[in-house]
């Protein structure tokens, strides 16, 4: 009995010890070694992930994508997992269609340097990825991720694509290999477009399948940018501009189309251009958005400001006439010749033939301060504030630093540098009844389809509606009878101004009479404009070089294509007309030195010499009789109306084109 | 175990041990507890593996969703490339279409006027072959089409101005 009891107790003791040992081990594992074992388990099953959100999309005004990002994969190798670099390189090279020696060398160099990440094929699309996975499949290998090849892995990345190619390239810009905006909207809206890097983790089972995942913190998705650009109008403008540059053998060209009532930019084109999908293949010069970066002397197009300021101040009667009989004007010892200035002429005609004498006299009557103030109100000397990077403000000195003849020079578009967008905005002001609307290129910003913000442009009344109407009438005459005849449209009325200015040579520090900037800025329809179109040609050569011959036809090409697209009702007849060069008066360049090339101005000079001693205008303000009220006599004017009919030119030689480029 | 003190002379063969009664209740209770414990383990294991299974399915659905989103983006890109003006122009040229310009449009006019204008134009060309500009009759503006606030009707001021002075009456210098 005793023995049985003892045996029983021994068995009990054995079980107690056994269970106690197990218990103690459990306590040790779960309490003492908790952190160590937990870390090991997580390490085994958990992957830390880093994923970058896709960059925001850039749309045009019709929700057509101009720039968008796609998920792509890059093939990379971890040399520490590759035993035989040569064999691996051979197989990989076959699939990627590259030289095996290059890949082998890369792997070996990385192994020596203890690198664990070398890219073999960057940013491949899904189809190519699948082909590579199938080609490199090694069924005997147990591997959690694809490709099933020792040492090779895929890395998720994103690739920026521009489906329009070179369409609006300088406006959209491009993002570099690190997905950072480097030009255009991509750069200026980098903060909105950029996708955040989201960190997270994934738990995988022994077969590599993910069964749990989470993100460390919630991030806002990137924003999408909707531009005011219309892709179809932009295309047409680019085509017309390219053709115009080639026809005139110009160095470059730019064109802007704006809606004057809203300040929206429908198109902003530059030539030459580039393809953002392969920006590396183009010269960096082509990246520049000349329409806002380049500044130039505007020439006669700036007369808009001259006449606007005088008319708005009531200093001139737009229905009156101005004395341009002398053919020249002297200001502060500098003579400005003008072959068109041979008679009394109405302001309409003065602008139509681009008379410098008339413009200078008008500016002199306005005065320095007034002229400067109006020019500033029109937006010159300051950036327009368009949402593009590195916009030029232009050069417009304050009156304190002006010379004696600066007002005269500025009145005809010299001694001032402007950007194309500033000029387009000034003309849009007149088109919009004197109200300047800040030009803008972004329509709205969206996030996940919801509109976060839309642009509200600033509006400023620069001149009265009446003044704007007078100016429109005068600009209409330019197109009907003046230097802008080649801008006449089929089916629509148009108004505008040509400009042909010598380029400023920074090395010589003076204007270069051999190089021109030829422009035409117009609006259509003339009375109630729907669009303002600016065309500028830089250094046209090999033939005609003035704005009327070189830029006005491009304006016409653009306007005739886009006005029907904008559903603008035609307000004129279709006309069939072939204009020759003789039908169009040319732009006259300022002649401060008094030297000319043509016989006609030489004749004028002889006449000038006779009267030079007798008439030395010290008092630069002309007598009041130049603001002659309208009369019924022959010289009287002429209440010009916005004529719907086209007049047959009576005398082809009067006001005819003169060859002199003084 | 009970310790029994038996007399020395007892006839052990004749003595029968007392049988302890089987505690059925306690056995049943133990059995139930055991079943409950084991069942609990099975339930926990099943929940664990089914949650793993759901997790795997969830992740694969998420992956599928991401793949479909990527595919949608890829197709959107292809669509945009195909619909770009350059591509449309190429396709149009291939099938023999030509681009329309404003000169190929005509303003809406009554047929009778058109005929008379044509004859007038023909006469004029016969009489003055060197004339560069055709004289046409004033066109009546077409109906206003309003879209996007951009389309404009023909200005009424232009009408008035035309009535006041026809172009042929404009004084020539």
Image: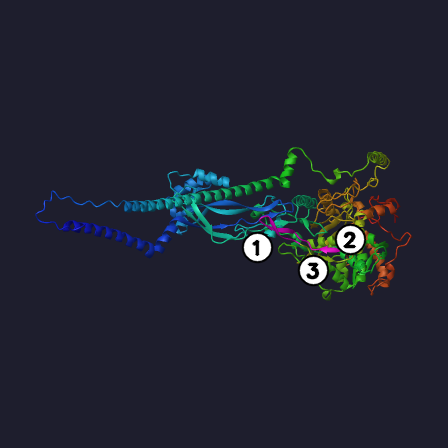
Q: CA distance from mark 2 to mark 1?
A: 48 Å
Of A137 and A242, the residue lying toward us: A137
A590 horizontally vs A159: left or right: right
Q: Indicate the secondary structure of the residue bearing disc 3.
A: loop
The picture quadrant where one finds residue A623 is: bottom right
Residue under pointer 2: A588
Q: Disc 2 and disc 3: Cα gap in Å?
A: 25 Å
Residue denoted by label 3:
A381
A428 or A86, nearer to the observer:
A428
Give the percent coordinates (x, y) of residue A100.
Answer: 43, 42
Q: Nearer the viewer, mark 2 or mark 3?
A: 3
| Element carrying mark 2 | loop
Whether A440 is among the magenta residues is: yes
Chain under label 2? A
User: Which mark's residue is nearer the viewer, 2 or 1?
Assistant: 1
Residue A546 visible in the current orientation = no
Residue bearing the label numbered 1:
A191
Categorize mark 3 by other alpha carbons within 10 Å: few (<14), some (14-19), many (20+): many
Q: Are marks 1 and 3 on the same chain?
A: yes
Residue A293 screen position, x and y as percent:
65, 55
Quarter of the picture containing the C terminus of chain A is bottom right
Where does the magenta region start and end? A432-455
């Amino acid at each position: 009995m005793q023995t049985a009891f003892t045996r029983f107790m021994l068995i009990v003791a054995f079980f107690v010890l056994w269970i106690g040992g197990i218990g103690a081990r459990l306590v040790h594992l779960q309490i003492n070694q908790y952190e160590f074992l937990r870390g090991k388990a997580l390490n085994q099953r958990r992957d830390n992930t880093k994923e970058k959100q896709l960059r925001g999309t850039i749309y045009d005004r019709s929700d057509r994508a101009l720039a968008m990002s796609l998920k792509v994969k890059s093939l990379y190798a971890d040399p520490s997992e590759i035993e035989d670099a040569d064999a691996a390189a051979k197989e990989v090279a076959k699939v990627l269609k590259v030289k095996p020696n290059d890949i082998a060398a890369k792997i070996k160099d990385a192994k020596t340097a203890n690198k664990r990440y070398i890219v073999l094929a960057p940013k491949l699309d899904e189809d190519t990825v699948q082909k590579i996975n199938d080609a490199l499949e090694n069924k005997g290998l147990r591997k959690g991720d694809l490709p099933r090849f020792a040492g090779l892995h895929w890395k998720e990345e994103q690739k920026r694509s521009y489906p329009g190619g070179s369409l609006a390239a300088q406006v959209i810009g491009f993002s570099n290999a690190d997905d950072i905006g480097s030009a255009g909207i991509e750069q200026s809206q980098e903060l909105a477009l950029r996708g955040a890097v989201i960190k997270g983790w994934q738990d995988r089972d022994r077969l590599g399948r993910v069964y749990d995942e989470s993100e460390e913190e919630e991030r806002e998705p990137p924003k999408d940018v909707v531009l005011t650009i219309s892709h179809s109008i932009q295309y047409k403008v680019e085509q017309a501009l390219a053709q115009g540059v080639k026809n005139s053998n110009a160095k470059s060209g730019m064109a802007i189309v704006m809606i004057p009532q809203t300040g929206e930019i429908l198109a902003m084109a530059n030539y030459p251009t580039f393809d953002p999908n392969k920006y590396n293949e183009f010269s960096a010069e082509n990246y520049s958005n000349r329409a806002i970066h380049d500044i130039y002397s505007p020439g006669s197009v700036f007369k808009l400001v001259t006449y606007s300021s005088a008319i708005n101040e009531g200093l001139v009667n737009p229905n009156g006439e101005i004395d341009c009989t002398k053919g020249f004007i002297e200001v502060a010892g500098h003579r400005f010749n003008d072959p068109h200035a041979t008679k009394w002429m109405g302001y309409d005609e003065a602008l139509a033939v681009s008379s410098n004498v008339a413009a200078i006299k008008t500016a002199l009557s306005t005065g320095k301060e007034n002229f400067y103030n109006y020019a500033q109100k029109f937006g010159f000397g300051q950036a327009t504030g368009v949402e593009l990077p590195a916009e030029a403000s232009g050069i417009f000195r304050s009156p304190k630093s002006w010379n004696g003849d600066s007002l005269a020079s500025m009145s005809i578009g010299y001694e001032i540098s402007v950007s194309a967008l500033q000029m387009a905005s000034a003309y849009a002001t007149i088109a919009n009844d004197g109200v300047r609307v800040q030009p803008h290129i972004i329509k709205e910003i969206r996030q996940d389809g919801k509109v976060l913000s839309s642009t509200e442009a600033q509006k400023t009344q620069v001149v009265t509606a009446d003044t704007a109407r007078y100016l429109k009438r005068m600009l209409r005459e330019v197109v009907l009878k003046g230097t802008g005849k080649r801008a006449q449209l089929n089916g629509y009325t148009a108004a505008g101004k040509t400009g042909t200015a010598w380029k400023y040579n920074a090395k010589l520090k003076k204007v270069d009479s051999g190089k021109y900037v030829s422009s035409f800025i117009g609006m259509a329809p003339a009375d109630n404009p729907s669009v303002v179109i600016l065309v500028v040609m830089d250094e046209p050569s090999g033939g005609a070089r003035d704005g009327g011959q070189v830029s006005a036809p491009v304006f016409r090409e653009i306007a005739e294509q886009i006005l029907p697209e904008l559903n603008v009702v035609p307000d004129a007849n279709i006309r069939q007309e072939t204009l020759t060069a003789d039908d169009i008066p040319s732009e006259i360049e300022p002649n401060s030195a008094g030297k000319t090339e043509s016989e006609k101005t030489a004749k004028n000079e002889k006449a000038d010499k006779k009267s030079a001693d007798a008439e030395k205008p010290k008092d630069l303000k002309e007598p009041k009789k130049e603001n002659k009220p309208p009369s019924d006599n022959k010289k009287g004017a002429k209440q010009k109306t916005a004529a719907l009919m086209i007049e047959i030119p009576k005398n082809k030689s009067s006001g005819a084109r003169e060859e002199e480029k003084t | 175990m009970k310790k029994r003190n038996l007399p020395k002379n007892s006839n052990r063969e004749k003595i029968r041990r007392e049988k302890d009664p089987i505690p059925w209740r306690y056995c049943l209770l133990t059995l139930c507890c055991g079943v409950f414990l084991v069942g609990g383990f099975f339930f926990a294991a099943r929940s664990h593996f089914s949650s793993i299974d759901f997790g795997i399915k969830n992740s694969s659905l998420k992956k599928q969703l991401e793949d479909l989103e990527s595919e949608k983006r890829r197709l959107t890109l292809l669509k945009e490339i195909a619909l770009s003006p350059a591509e449309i122009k190429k396709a149009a040229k291939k099938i023999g279409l030509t681009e329309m310009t404003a000169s190929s449009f005509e303003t809406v006019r009554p047929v009778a006027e058109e005929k008379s204008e044509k004859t007038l134009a023909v006469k004029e060309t016969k009489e003055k072959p060197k004339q560069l500009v055709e004289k046409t009759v004033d066109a009546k503006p077409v109906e206003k089409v309003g879209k996007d606030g951009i389309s404009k009707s023909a200005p009424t001021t232009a009408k008035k101005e035309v009535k006041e002075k026809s172009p042929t009456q404009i004084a020539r210098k």
